[in-house]
Image: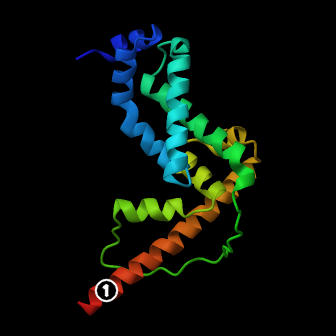
């Protein structure tokens, strides 16, 4: 098995064998990122393909500082953000009414959600909310960084995150209530 360093060097020499190894090594992780930032599977596939094209095109610019996976991840994130910016006009931006009220605290014996439920609820968020939520919560960026990346005000980033969390909380509570009702019937 080739080391990552050897794979990188092979890719820098445009060797197809090493490009395939790099692809195989990072495909699942990077496709997961694409799915989080895309509205549809087809859109995720487009981002995925464009991301790998960029990785192979710019691999000679990698300077071996920091993790290579982090460098690849950054390319995919930037590709997803660029896709969002370029397609903004295509999306219907439904205004979702999010009240500023505190949601009641309801005690459940167990709050558990499947991965599919969580991904589905996140994917249902409006595009801007989903993008900010993913960048802040999953990728760990600060609001200042997100604002710069998306060319928005820092306060807009904070507001969208707040609204995304509130909307997720409401939708997850609905799922919990359905599960509780179903469990009581059994």
Q: Mark 1 = which residue?
A: 182
In the rendered image, the vertical position of residue 162 relative to residue 35, given as above or below: below
Question: Image check: 69 left or right of 38?
Answer: left
In the rendered image, the vertical position of residue 30 relative to residue 122, given as above or below: above
The x and y percentages for residue 16 are 39, 16
Instruction: Say which residue appears at 71% left-offset and 43% top-offset.
Output: 86
User: Is residue 91 visible in the rendered structure shown here?
Assistant: yes
Question: Image check: 174 left or right of 145?
Answer: left
Question: Image check: 164 left or right of 66?
Answer: right
Instruction: Say which residue appears at 51% left-offset and 24% top-offset.
Output: 55
Instruction: Say which residue appears at 66% left-offset and 38% top-offset.
Output: 82
Looking at the rendered image, the quarter that the N terminus falls into is top left
In the rendered image, the vertical position of residue 83 relative to residue 53, given as above or below: below
The x and y percentages for residue 134 are 54, 50
User: Residue 100 appears in which quarter of the rendering?
Assistant: bottom right
User: Residue 74 appears in which quarter of the rendering?
Assistant: top right
Extreme residue in the bottom direction: 185
Tell me how the rendering is colored.
rainbow
Q: Nearer the viewer, residue 19 or 176?
A: 19
In the rendered image, the vertical position of residue 7 relative to residue 25, given as above or below: above
The secondary element bearing badge 1 is classed as: helix
Q: Nearer the viewer, residue 88 or 114?
A: 88
**Total marks placed:** 1
User: Is residue 139 visible in the rendered structure shown here?
Assistant: no
Neighbor class of circle 1 (other Cα within 10 Å; few <14, some 14-19, many 20+) is few
């Amino acid at each position: 098995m080739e080391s990552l360093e050897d794979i990188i060097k092979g890719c820098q020499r445009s060797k197809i064998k090493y490009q395939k190894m790099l692809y195989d090594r990072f495909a699942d992780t990077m496709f997961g990122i694409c799915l989080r930032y895309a509205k549809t599977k087809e859109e995720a596939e487009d981002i995925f393909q464009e991301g790998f094209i960029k990785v192979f095109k710019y691999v000679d610019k990698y300077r071996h500082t920091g993790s290579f996976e982090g460098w690849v991840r950054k390319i995919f994130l930037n590709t997803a953000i660029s896709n969002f910016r370029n397609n903004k006009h295509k999306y219907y931006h439904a205004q979702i009414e999010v009240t500023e009220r505190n949601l009641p605290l309801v005690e459940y014996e167990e709050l558990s959600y499947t991965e599919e439920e969580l991904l589905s609820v996140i994917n249902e968020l409006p595009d801007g909310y989903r993008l900010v939520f993913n960048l802040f919560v999953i990728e760990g960026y600060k609001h200042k960084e997100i604002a710069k990346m998306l060319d928005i005000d820092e306060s807009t980033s904070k507001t969208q995150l707040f609204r995304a969390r509130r909307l997720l909380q409401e939708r997850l509570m609905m799922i919990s209530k359905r599960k509780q009702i179903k469990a009581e019937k059994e």
